[in-house]
Image (tube, helix red, strand yellow):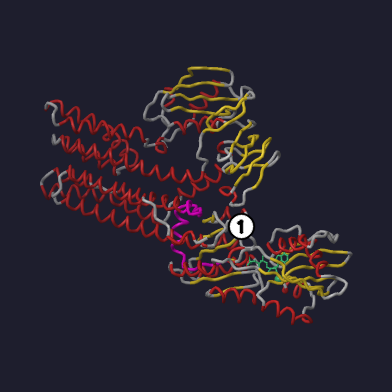
Amino acid sequence: MTALPWLRTLEIVHRLPGRIRLRYRRNPHAPDAAALEGMARLIDGVTSARANARAASLVIAFDATRADAKTIVATLADFRWDEAKNKPRADEGAGAVASSLAVLLGSGVLPMPARLPISLAAALPLLREGVADYRENGVTSHVLEAMAVSISLARSDFLAANATTFMLALGEYMEHSIARRSDDLLKHLLRPSSDLIWVLRGGEEVQISAGDVAVGESVVVGAGAVIPVDGTVMSGEGVVNEAAMTGESVSVIKTRGSKVLSGATMEDGRLTIYAEQVGRHTAAARIADYVEQSLTAKSEAQLDAARLADRLVPTVLKLAGVSAVLTGDWRSAASVLQADYSCALKLATPVAFKSAMFNAGQAGILVKGATALERLAEADTFIFDKTGTLTTGRLDVTDSIAFDSAYSAEDLIWLAASVEEHYFHPLALAVVNAAQATGRNAHFDHTEVQFIVAHGVASEVNGQRVVVGSRHFVEDHEGVDVSAQSEVVERLYLEGKTLLFIGFGGRLLGLLALKDSLRSNAADTIARLRRSGVRRILMLTGDHRDRAAELAEDLGLDGFHAELTPTDKAEIVADLSAKGAKIAFIGDGINDAPALAGAHVGVAMQKGADIARLTADVVLLEDSIARVADARLLANAAMARIAANYKLTVGLNTAILGLAALGVLSPVATAVLHNGATIGILLNAFRGSAPSSDKRSA
Ligand SMILES: Nc1ncnc2c1ncn2[C@@H]1O[C@H](COP(=O)(O)OP(=O)(O)OP(=O)(O)O)[C@@H](O)[C@H]1O
Ligand SMILES: [Zn+2]
């Protein structure tokens, strides 16, 4: 990292209490506007910072009790600035393209003596960059480019030198604008799109840039806008959809006192929000950061490309030497040097990944990074959790059978609901719903409730132990004899129901049967997955063996494991992985979070627990299991495109390189061919991988 003296050029031009305007001289080493703002905001006491690149000014607002102008400027001066992270910039690139083009067109008509200085001036940035890069990183592709141009200049081949400079500038500009566009697309998916927001200041609504809003301000949000801050509603009423943040697709009504999250959209109404978290501290920014971080983690495909690129540079250099010796012509050396394609190699793959991730996002699938995409395509074994994943997770109580005449069917439901009402498990929610549907309130007072994961719940009513849960729990753990009712139990299982056993005072008091329906598109999804090359599809569940067997049969799965605890599920995943399976685990995070985290790639259902959406590599943004197959097909398509692009990059450029080495191609022809090929390949990578046509089979 190099700390550059850009701040020599920083001066205060205007000063007010709590506010200063600084001017910085634009130089190539100055951080860009966003970086400047970011640095300023890190300073203690600074409430907002806004840089204007065009005016080269930086306005900083601060809390005058906590900071003063002098310390702020001094602190800014202390920041070490890593220039490498800030380059290159689009406008500069465009300028270089224009000036090198002018020189290229003009050099032919200029008088001979003027040609060298003009050509040299045009090539200077490139030569300088080559030298700087050489000092810092040794022989890189920039160094090769500088050598190519130097050779042409030395031979007074100005046409070649200028054409090369122009093509390189153009190529670089295109490469980076395509790369940046794919970044922007992705950020657009994650960040509120509008930058201007309304706030109340001095009783009036004023429009400011979202970056300028401070904690404690009142932000006004109308229908259609994205909420820019995390905060509490002070007034108004609105329908808010937080799907992008929490995955919850059902919109909720927010009124005075409700909490709202940045990144959520206002579907209707109007809210005034007290801003509690702004800018980088908001939930939206945290999620975006997370995804950006995982983006920088290099996938295998990216590493392969980078490794080849690194090996390529010295090879090209040697080839240029050999070619010059064999052909006896420096021109061929210049041609070879600029046919180096390590840059294209390094860029094409990430661009393709990002554009695939963007497409996935639009198809309702959040893919957290290139590695996730790669692994999704690699997975040969798909393992589904049952409840809430293959099934809807919205259960209905169909039967309530009490074996003690003192209790009615409704009493039994109420007894279970009284102890279940504290839990979010789909079974618990179903029981509580059923109790409410009875239209009366027959709550049983009980002592504290114990929850035994993947087994059930237990408490005490009137001094007697009450247990609600699986047969295994009630029978094996609680010693309640169930055998007398085995006929009823058998019948209900045969009807495809999930059973809850209710023990009271050590006896079996009754049974609740629940029906959970398979998602209508579960079978279709399984079939599509098989067609996409998945070899084995399994189901894991905490539910009873009989129920699981029936579902597995209906769906044509390759196998299932039932009556599992969350740890059992994780162990099965670990076990199969150890045997070489590449597992994609699909679950909702309720009693399957460890398995989700332990899989090669974890896919979280949209309605899943927060933890699932946070730890999973892929998050469905719609409550449809069809998105799992969509995600797989998308990943396959993206990987195929990346592989094809890679071959094309290597093949095409190797051919150009070979011809250049043989002296067949002039430096100008090489520059045109090489840069044309690079741009074509990038555009191809950028072109979205079209998701399969049946993706909207909801
Ligand atoms: N809150 C609860 N109340 C009653 N029984 C429960 C509760 N939680 C779990 N159980 C019992 O434990 C069993 C296993 O629960 P678990 O959540 O692991 O699996 P599941 O509900 O069948 O879903 P999955 O297919 O996702 O594993 C359930 O089938 C049920 O019998
Ligand atoms: Zn047990």
Nearer to me, 116 or 395: 395
Q: What residue do we see at 62% from left, 51% from top?
A: 250
Q: What residue do we see at 61% from left, 33% from top?
A: 219
* Residue 263 position within the rendered picture, expressed as x and y whole percent measured from the top left: 56, 43
Q: What residue do we see at 39% from left, 25% from top?
A: 26
Viewed as shown, does residue 584 lie left or right of 516? left
Q: Is residue 379 magenta?
A: yes
Viewed as shown, does residue 631 lie left or right of 449? left
User: Can you say whether 265 is above or below 481 in the image?
Assistant: above
* Residue 342 position within the rendered picture, expressed as x and y whole percent measured from the top left: 30, 48
* Residue 649 position within the rendered picture, expressed as x and y whole percent measured from the top left: 29, 53
Query: How many numbered tags mark residues here?
Result: 1
Nearer to me, 101 or 2: 101
Q: Quadrant of ligand 2?
A: bottom right
User: Can you say whether 657 is above or below 433 in the image?
Assistant: above
The quarter holding residue 172 reads top left
Nearer to me, 661 or 55: 55
Respond yes or no on whether mark 1 lies under 8 Å from ligand 1. Answer: no
User: Can you say whether 21 is above or below 227 in the image?
Assistant: above
The quarter holding residue 173 reads top left
Viewed as shown, does residue 208 lie left or right of 90? right
Viewed as shown, does residue 480 lie left or right of 579? right
| Residue type, numbered disc 1 | Gly
**Residue extent of the magenta highlight:** 360-384
Q: Residues within 10 Å of mark 1 (few under 14, many from 20)?
A: many
Location of the N terminus by quadrant is top left
Q: Which residue is mark 1?
A: 608
User: Can you say whether 396 is above or below 272 in the image?
Assistant: below
* Residue 355 position within the rendered picture, expressed as x and y whole percent measured from the top left: 41, 50
Q: Is residue 497 magenta?
A: no
- Element under disc 1: loop
